[in-house]
Amino acid sequence: MFNQLREDVNAVRERDPAARSFLEVLLLYPGVKAVRMHRRAHFYYRHNLHFLARWVSQRAVRKTGIEIHPGATIGRRLVIDHGTGVVIGETTEIGDDVLIYQGVTLGGTGKDTGKRHPTIGNNVMISAGAKVLGPFKIGDNSRVAAGAVVLEEVPPNSTVVGVPARVVKLDGKRVDCAQNLDQIHIPDPVKQKMECLEKRMEQLETLLNIEATEGETHHEDL
């Protein structure tokens, strides 16, 4: 248990340049406190002590602003940065080395039964305000942009952006340095589409001008 806690704290220190000491992260970071309390709540949940599990998880919400259902399964070295407004549903499964920012929801659509919430692979980053809704998987090493709404499976090594979210990078294509992407420096698919439309309009205008010029020349010849 202590080794797991030490891993969680060190993971935060590695990812957060504002973290100054082990003790500061352990005692003052809400994400660490929420994960620590969730592990206890999940233990009670697995042993059918559901009321006690829920009691611990609700205490965590009041203390941290982070709501993790005691039934959710969390891997090693989960980092919840800032964390206010994070909601993680009952059947969510989270792999190792995942980074989650504030305002993220790992939830359901209300249409599914049984497995209702997403499965998050290893080394996934989910940026601020993103919503991942439904019983599908976010593949390993993927990135979800800030404010994205993900409604379907995301393949490994992908970057998704937009509402609804679309893949804009896969296996290193379209973005030169995928591993160095942060939660804001990600291509905007709407902007890319608008640029394509503008380019197409310019091409059509050029063709119309050519046809108009040819028509005037033909009229003068007559």
Image (cartoon, grey):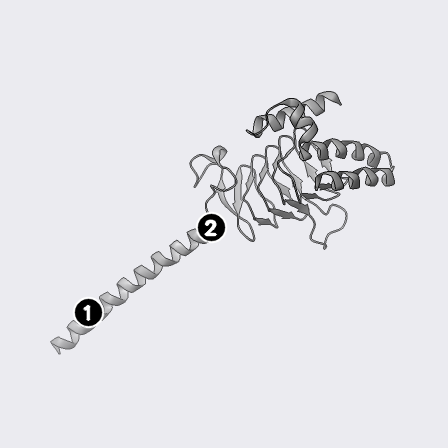
Q: Position of residue 218 (x, y in %)?
A: 16, 74
Residue lying at 46% horizontally and 53% vertically, measured from the top left:
190
58 vs 85, left or right, is right
Q: Position of residue 220 (x, y in %)?
A: 13, 76
Provide the residue designation for mark 1: 214
As rendered, which of 35 and 33 lies closer to the eye? 33
Q: Cα distance, mark 2 to mark 1?
A: 38 Å
Q: Which mark is residue 67?
A: none
- Kindly indicate the quadrant of the structure image that contains residue 90: top right
**From this viewpoint, which residue is outermost toward the bottom?**
222
Q: Position of residue 10 (x, y in %)?
A: 63, 24
Q: Is residue 11 above or below residue 41?
A: above
As rendered, which of 168 and 35 lies closer to the eye? 35
Q: Is residue 58 above or below residue 14?
A: below
Give the amino acid at mark 1.
Glu
**From this viewpoint, which residue is outermost toward the top?**
3
Where the C terminus falls, by quadrant? bottom left
Give the amino acid at mark 2.
Pro
Disc nearer the start of the sequence (2/1): 2
- Kindly indicate the quadrant of the structure image that contains residue 141: top right
Q: Is residue 8 above or below residue 202?
A: above
Residue lying at 65% horizontally and 30% vertically, measured from the top left:
96
As rendered, which of 169 and 49 lies closer to the eye? 49
Provide the residue designation for mark 2: 189
Tell me the crowding category of disc 2: few under 14, some 14 to 19, or many 20 or more residues within 10 angstroms, Cα based: some
Depth-wise, is mark 2 or mark 1 nearer the camera? 2
As rendered, which of 97 and 7 lies closer to the eye? 7
Tell me the crowding category of disc 1: few under 14, some 14 to 19, or many 20 or more residues within 10 angstroms, Cα based: few
Q: Position of residue 13 (x, y in %)?
A: 60, 26
Q: Secondary structure at mark 2?
A: helix
